[in-house]
């Protein structure tokens, strides 16, 4: 079945149009749960430029006309044994169509070709979307992690469906009661 898009690696040699589209998508995709992230187009442009570094990964899903629909980035850590998935952004008009899943799967394959063993990511809870927000995470941390609930379509469930597991939590990462949920997956 034709997905209507292809996934390809973007580099610093990619077109200015592709880079700009990726920056715009970044400013739009995070508004629901993370309204303070990449608020201005300049912030998006800066993030895209950083992700185009030679040692990083930027994979884009593009339609047949070359328009960027979404993208995923990756940052090597621990001498390339671990890769941080950062960020994943799909244009709001194209969310829920499998593009995010396809980007993550392509990212996993790319990490494997680069010798990575583990992928980790952080997914912040800044708006009370999970049971880990607005509580003391220094008491009974592991029990609270094991009892994680998603109240409001938080991305944690998307990643769980792709095989990522909650491997940690950073209390108050984004302010009091606003944790960062740390997820990970072994590269197969």
Image (cartoon, grey):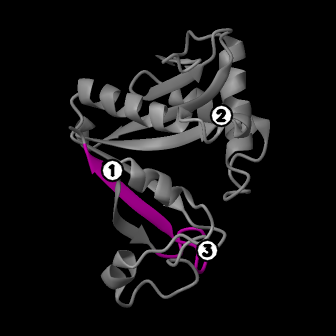
Query: Label 1, label 3: how many angstroms apart (C-alpha)?
Result: 28 Å
Q: Which residue is mark 1?
A: 163
Task: Using residue 149 as the reference point, say whether residue 25 is left or right of it.
Answer: right
Q: Which residue is mark 2?
A: 46
Q: Nearer the viewer, residue 82 or 159?
A: 159
Could you tell me which secondary element the residue under label 2 belongs to?
helix
At x 54% / y 40%, what residue is drawn?
Answer: 88
Which quadrant of the rendered structure holds the C terminus? top left
Q: Position of residue 152 (x, y in %)?
A: 63, 67
At x 24% / y 40%, what residue is drawn?
Answer: 187
Q: Residue furthest front?
A: 1
Residue extent of the magenta highlight: 171-186
> Which of the two discs, 1 and 2, labels the residue nearer the N terminus?
2
> Which of the two discs, 1 and 3, labels the residue nearer the N terminus?
1
Compared with 128, 162 (above or below) is: above
Residue 114 visible in image = no
Q: Position of residue 21 (x, y in %)?
A: 71, 24
């Amino acid at each position: 079945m034709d997905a209507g898009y292809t996934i390809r690696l973007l580099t610093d040699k990619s077109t200015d149009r592709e880079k700009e589209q990726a920056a715009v998508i970044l400013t739009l995709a995070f508004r629901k749960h993370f309204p303070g992230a990449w608020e201005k187009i300049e912030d998006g442009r800066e993030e895209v430029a950083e992700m185009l570094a030679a040692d990083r990964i930027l994979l884009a899903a593009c339609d047949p006309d070359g328009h960027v629909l979404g993208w995923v980035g990756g940052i090597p850590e621990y001498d390339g044994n671990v890769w941080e998935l950062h960020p994943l952004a799909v244009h709001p008009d194209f969310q829920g169509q499998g593009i995010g899943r396809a980007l993550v799967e392509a990212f996993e394959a790319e990490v494997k070709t680069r010798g990575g063993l583990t992928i980790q990511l952080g997914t912040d809870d800044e708006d009370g979307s999970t049971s880990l927000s607005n509580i003391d995470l220094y008491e009974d941390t592991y029990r609270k992690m094991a009892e994680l609930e998603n109240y409001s379509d938080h991305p944690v469930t998307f990643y769980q469906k792709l095989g990522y597991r909650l491997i940690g939590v950073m209390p108050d990462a984004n302010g009091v009661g606003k944790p960062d949920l740390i997820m990970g997956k072994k590269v197969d």
